[in-house]
Image (cartoon, rainbow, N blue to C red):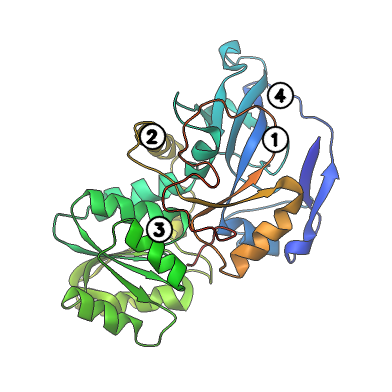
Amino acid sequence: MRAIQVASFGGPEVLTPVEMPEPVPGPGQLVVGMVAADVIFLDTLLRSGWGRELFPRTLPYVPGSGGAGEVLAVGAGVDPGWRGRRVVVRGDGTYAEQAVVREEDVLPVPDGLSTTAAAALVHDGVTALGFHRVGAPGPGEWVLVTSAAGGAGTLLVRLAVEAGARVVAAASSEAKRALARDLGADAVVDYTRADWTDRVREATGGGAALAYDGAGGALGTRTVDAVADGGRYLTYGTADGFAAPDGEEAARRGIRLHAPLKDGPPEQADVRALLGLALARAAEGRLRPVIGAVHPLERASDAHRALAARAVVGKSLLLVGGAEDRAGGAEGRPGAEEGRAGADGDGGRE
């Protein structure tokens, strides 16, 4: 089977197309024929050798930690009824035509939802719904979303608007800010400007009640300056490492800080519940991912380069092949998604 392999940590060039033996499922495992693999910024960091204490990788390895496809085979102890079903996968080694995963790592794709749309929600749907639950934006509140044109950012904008909040979206290009407006943002700012936090405070009349930081690093750290006293700040961005807000200063201002990624991987049961909810909402038309770019499996290096270049609007996927995308419906399909801006890639910072 075709796969992408990383034999040494480094730049995008270490993503090498290879031929590998087809996997055989062991007890409690399934083999999934991948249709689309999710591409997230964390993939690029792990490829470079970052974060091995939290996300250990043993060389050589097949990258990828999610996607969607069709169950081809099941191992001992697995319900044979899984065979032939479309599923989403949250497991390692998904940059490949086939991935072997545990039964608890898959969920069925609901009828009426395309396989590619399901793949686009594997990580970002969980992130967005989890942060939306913690942030709990209320009607009339100002919500700041940074990296607002990214995979999770677009979903957070939609969720905040649906909750009746007013959204100020921060993004790095006019195309990305236009997308945020299309998704319902009331105001947009260019966070490549030195005074961008001042502009947020001006637009919101003193600062956002809630901020979602999808950038991380220095930019994510500065995001706290755009939050009103007594507000909430949630960070999930890793494009430039973790944000590092001043805890004492935040406490003095009464700002609650949440950085769940620093606590390690979330509980499996919580992830499954959130992913199931994301898929159900998407099937109902209530949660629609913006797929901005697709790349063939062999061009995984191009997908990673696009992420690093911040040349991203919406979600990026690798199209692998395998089963036909039988669901019908446009949601999540490349070129058919509402709000698609036509850029190449998905990134951790928009």
Looking at the picture, how far across and down is residue 259, in whole percent? Answer: 38, 61
* Mark 4–mark 2 distance (CA, rounded to whole Å): 25 Å
Identify which amino acid the numbered label 1 is placed on.
Answer: Gly
In the rendered view, would you say 27 is above or below 186?
A: above
Q: Nearer the viewer, residue 129 or 311?
A: 311
Q: What secondary structure is found at the residue carrying circle 1?
A: loop
**Which corner quadrant of the image does residue 156 belong to?**
bottom left
Q: Earlier in the sequence, mark 1 or mark 4?
A: 4
Q: Earlier in the sequence, mark 4 or mark 2?
A: 4
Residue found at x 66% / y 60%: 304
Viewer-nearest of discs 2 and 3: 3
**Which corner quadrant of the image does residue 171 belong to?**
bottom left
Q: Is residue 290 left or right of residue 11?
A: left
Q: Residues within 10 Å of mark 1 (few under 14, many from 20)?
A: some
* Mark 4–mark 3 distance (CA, rounded to whole Å): 36 Å
Q: Is residue 140 left or right of residue 226?
A: left
Residue found at x 51% / y 26%: 327
Looking at the picture, how far across and down is residue 257, in whole percent? Answer: 30, 66
Residue behind mark 2:
273
Residue behind mark 1:
321
* Mark 3–mark 1 distance (CA, rounded to whole Å): 27 Å
Identify which amino acid the numbered label 2 is placed on.
Answer: Ala
Q: Residues within 10 Å of mark 3 (few under 14, many from 20)?
A: many
The answer to whether residue 297 of the structure is visible from this angle is yes
What is the residue that sits farthest to the bottom in this orientation? 194
Q: What secondary structure is found at the residue carrying circle 4?
A: loop
Residue behind mark 3:
153
* Mark 2–mark 1 distance (CA, rounded to whole Å): 28 Å
Q: Are marks 3 and 1 in contact (CB under 8 Å)?
A: no
Identify which amino acid the numbered label 4 is placed on.
Answer: Pro
Viewer-nearest of discs 2 and 1: 1
Q: Which mark is residue 25?
A: 4
